[in-house]
Image (tube, grey):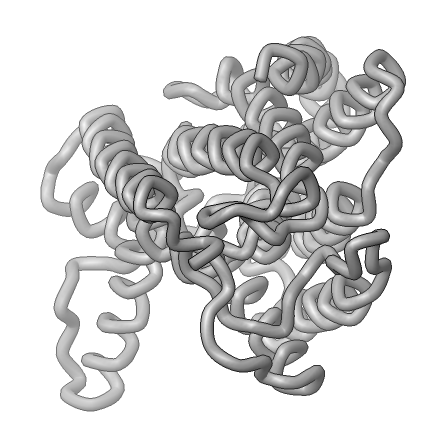
C-alpha cells in the first residue's frame, strides 16, 4: 500500500505546480471560462477564470503512474494502460468542448449529440481492447459479465458487453460532468471514490486467485495496477483541488470532468465492481437523477421540480452559500463511499468472490 501511494504523491506534486503554471499562462493570454447568463447570477463574477485544468490532471496522472513503474521496476499492465487511455480519450472529448467555449466564445460548447458520440466511441474502443490481452491465467482486463462485488450471471456476449461498457462510460462521465458546477464540488467526491478504489485494488491484489485458489479470491487481471492508477489520479485531483477550492483560481472544465468520469468507469470495469459504483458514486447518481427528473417533469407536465438543475444550482437559488453546498455534498459523498466500502468488505468477509 505504501508503494502504491507513491504514485499519488508524485501526481499531486506535479498537479500542484502544474496548475500554478497553467493559471499564469492562461491569465496572460486572457483565456477563461465563458459563464452562461441563464444560470445563477452569482456565477457571472466567475467569468474569465482560467479553465481546462483537466489537462494538468491528466498529465499529472500519466506521469505519476509512469514514475511509479520506473521506480519500482514493475511492468505496465494492460488494465492500467487501458484505464488511462479511456481517461485521456474522454479528456480529449472534453478538451474539444472547452476549446469551443474558450476560443470560439460559445458558452454551451460542443453540441450534446457530438459530445455523446465522442464518449461512445471512447467507450467502445476501451471495451474492444479490454476484452483482449489475456494473461497466463487467461484473465483479460474486462469480463463479459455484469459485476457488483465480483462477476455474476452468465456472459452477456461481445456485442452486449460493448453496449454495456458504453452505458457505464457515458453515464459515469456525464454524471461527474453534471456535478462539476461549483468550486471544488466534483474534485472532492472523485478523490473519495478513487481512494476507495485504492483500497479495493489493494485488497483484491492481496487476495488474488492467481496467487492461490481459495474461497473469496478475486479473478481480476491487474488489481494492484488498478490501485496505482486510482492513487495517481487521486493525487492529481488533490493537487488540482488546492487551486480549485472556493474561490477557484482554475476550473477543470469538461476536459477534467469527462476524464475523471472515464477513469472511474475504467476502474470499475477492470476491478469487476461496475454496479458497486452506484453506491460509491452515490452523489453523482443523485445529481444526474435531478437532471433526468427535471427534464422529464417539464416535458410531461410543463412544470419544474427544482428551481434549477443540476441539484446544486437548486440550492444556490434557494439561498444556500456555495461553500455550504460544497461541504454538505462532500459529506453526502463520503457517506456513500463509506457505505460502498462496508458492503464490499462484508462481501469479502463472507467469501463471495470465490463462492
Q: Is residue 275 above or below residue 159?
A: above
Q: Residue 173 at x, y = what percent?
A: 54, 56
What residue lies at 56% left-to-right and 76% top-to-bottom? Answer: 164
Question: Is 73 situated left or right of 42 in this image?
Answer: right
Which residue reaches farthest bottom?
A: 300
The residue that appears at 72% across and 53% down in the rendered structure is 86
Q: Name the foreground residue: 37 vs 182.
A: 182
Q: Is residue 309 left or right of residue 35?
A: left
Does residue 354 appear anywhere in the picture?
A: yes
In the image, taking residue 28 as reference, residue 247 lies left or right, namely: left
Q: Position of residue 153 (x, y in %)?
A: 47, 77
Query: How far across and down, in percent of the image, does residue 257 sit?
Result: 55, 45
Quarter of the C terminus within the rendering: bottom left
Above or below residue 153? Residue 224 is above
**Residue 48's image quarter?**
top right
Residue 325: x, y in percent?
22, 34
Q: Residue at x 56, y 72 (%)?
A: 145
Q: Taking the image as drawn, is residue 99 in sight? A: no
Place residue 41 in its image quadrant: top left
Q: Residue at x 75, y 62 (%)?
A: 130
Decide: is 213 above or below 8: below
Front-most of residues 170 and 271: 271
Q: Quadrant of the N terminus?
A: top right
Q: How many marks?
A: 0
Amino acid at each position: 500500500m505504501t508503494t502504491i501511494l507513491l504514485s499519488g504523491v508524485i501526481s499531486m506534486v506535479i498537479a500542484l505546480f502544474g496548475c500554478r503554471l497553467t493559471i499564469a499562462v492562461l491569465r496572460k493570454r486572457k483565456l477563461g471560462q465563458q459563464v452562461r447568463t441563464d444560470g445563477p447570477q452569482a456565477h457571472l463574477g466567475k467569468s474569465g477564470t482560467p479553465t481546462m485544468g483537466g489537462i494538468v490532471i491528466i498529465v499529472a496522472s500519466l506521469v505519476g503512474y509512469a514514475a511509479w513503474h520506473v521506480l519500482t521496476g514493475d511492468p505496465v499492465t494492460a488494465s492500467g494502460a487501458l484505464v488511462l487511455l479511456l481517461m485521456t480519450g474522454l479528456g480529449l472529448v472534453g478538451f474539444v468542448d472547452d476549446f469551443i467555449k474558450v476560443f470560439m466564445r460559445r458558452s454551451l460548447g460542443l453540441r450534446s449529440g457530438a459530445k455523446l458520440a465522442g464518449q461512445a466511441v471512447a467507450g467502445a474502443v476501451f471495451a474492444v481492447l479490454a476484452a483482449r490481452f489475456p494473461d497466463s491465467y487467461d484473465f483479460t482486463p474486462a469480463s463479459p459479465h455484469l459485476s457488483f462485488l465480483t462477476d455474476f450471471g452468465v456472459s452477456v456476449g461481445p456485442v452486449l458487453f460493448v453496449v454495456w461498457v458504453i452505458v457505464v462510460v457515458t453515464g459515469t462521465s456525464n454524471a461527474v460532468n453534471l456535478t462539476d458546477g461549483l468550486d471544488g464540488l466534483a474534485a472532492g467526491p472523485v478523490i473519495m471514490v478513487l481512494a476507495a478504489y485504492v483500497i479495493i485494488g489493494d485488497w483484491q491484489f492481496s487476495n488474488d486467485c492467481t496467487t492461490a485458489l481459495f474461497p473469496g479470491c478475486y479473478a481480476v487481471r491487474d488489481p494492484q495496477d488498478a490501485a496505482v492508477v486510482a492513487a495517481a489520479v487521486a493525487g492529481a485531483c488533490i493537487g488540482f483541488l488546492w487551486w480549485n477550492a472556493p474561490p477557484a483560481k482554475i476550473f477543470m472544465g469538461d476536459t477534467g470532468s469527462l476524464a475523471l468520469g472515464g477513469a472511474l468507469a475504467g476502474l470499475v470495469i477492470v476491478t469487476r465492481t461496475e454496479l458497486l459504483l452506484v453506491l460509491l458514486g452515490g452523489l453523482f447518481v443523485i445529481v444526474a437523477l435531478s437532471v433526468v427528473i427535471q427534464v422529464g417533469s417539464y416535458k410531461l407536465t410543463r412544470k419544474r421540480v427544482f428551481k434549477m438543475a443540476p441539484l446544486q444550482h437548486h440550492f444556490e437559488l434557494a439561498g444556500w452559500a456555495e461553500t455550504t453546498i460544497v461541504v454538505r455534498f462532500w459529506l453526502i459523498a463520503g457517506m456513500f463511499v463509506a457505505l460502498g466500502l462496508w458492503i464490499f468488505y462484508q462481501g469479502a468477509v463472507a467469501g463471495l468472490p470465490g463462492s
